[in-house]
Image (cartoon, rainbow, N blue to C red):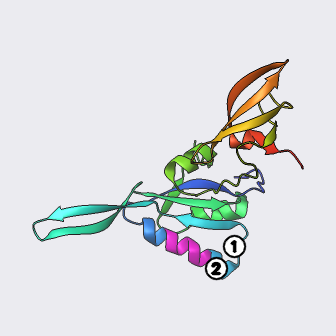
């Protein structure tokens, strides 16, 4: 099987035998270290949640796998990396149609909490910004409000001589150079 040569590392879901998730993750990490593949296979993750379990002896905190029988791997997909992961002991295959691995979307990665992205905003309330994406791209606006999670921005833009309030994703605006 020949895969298209990717250059961007993306998250892929690897199916494992039940109970082998941690062993598979360790094996992949060991192979990456031994072969010097850190630039191709960047991260291996077994998503878990901490749960307080109550028994007659009291409460104890345990880790529970969020997705039993699955391991998440951030990698540059090519024939070599596909072959390495696919032939790791305990791996039954990639998630995707047939044997074609399908990467997780950015939304899926964010929802699953696999990768935490920090949002850096270079403007503040009261600053003028340029709208760079969406139907209002190219317009200038004044920042009225920035959400606590830094994901959305409320901007007042002048559209055809009329003040219009819009809510945009923070990546749809950029600070005007002073």
Give above or below for 37 relative to 116. Answer: below
The image position of residue 161, as x and y in percent, is 84, 18
The image position of residue 71, as x and y in percent, is 50, 60
Helix, strand or loop under label 2:
helix
Give above or below for 108 relative to 132. Answer: below
Label 2 Cα crowd, 10 Å radius (few <14 / some 14-19 / many 20+): few
- Image check: 3 left or right of 47? right
Of 119 and 23, nearer the camera is 119
Evaluate if marks 2 and 1 touch, with contact meaning CB atoms under 8 Å apart.
yes
Of 142 and 81, nearer the camera is 142
Of 158 and 17, nearer the camera is 158
Helix, strand or loop under label 1:
loop
Query: What secondary structure predominates along the stretch shown in magenta?
Result: helix
For mark 2, what is the residue?
33
Give above or below for 17 relative to 122. Answer: below
The image position of residue 155, as x and y in percent, is 71, 33
The image position of residue 94, as x and y in percent, is 56, 53
Q: Residue, x 57% and y 48% (percent of image)?
A: 149
Magenta span of residues: 25-31
Q: What is the residue that sits farthest to the right in this orientation? A: 178
């Amino acid at each position: 099987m020949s895969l298209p040569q990717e250059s961007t590392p993306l998250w892929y879901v690897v199916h494992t035998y039940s109970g082998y998730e941690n062993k598979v993750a360790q094996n992949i990490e060991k192979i990456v270290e031994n072969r010097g593949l850190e630039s191709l296979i960047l991260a291996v993750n077994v998503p878990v949640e901490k749960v307080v379990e109550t028994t007659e002896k009291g409460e104890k905190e345990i880790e529970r796998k969020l997705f039993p029988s699955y391991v998440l791997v951030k990698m540059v997909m090519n024939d070599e990396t596909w072959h390495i992961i696919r032939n790791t002991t305990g791996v039954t295959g990639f998630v995707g149609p047939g044997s074609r691995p399908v990467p997780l979307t950015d939304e899926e990665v964010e929802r699953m909490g696999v990768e935490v992205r920090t949002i850096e905003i270079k403007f503040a309330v009261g600053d003028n910004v340029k709208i760079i994406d969406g139907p209002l791209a190219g317009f200038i606006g004044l920042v009225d409000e920035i959400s606590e999670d830094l994901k959305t921005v409320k901007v007042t833009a002048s559209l055809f001589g009329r003040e219009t309030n819009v809510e945009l994703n923070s990546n749809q605006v950029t600070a005007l150079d002073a």
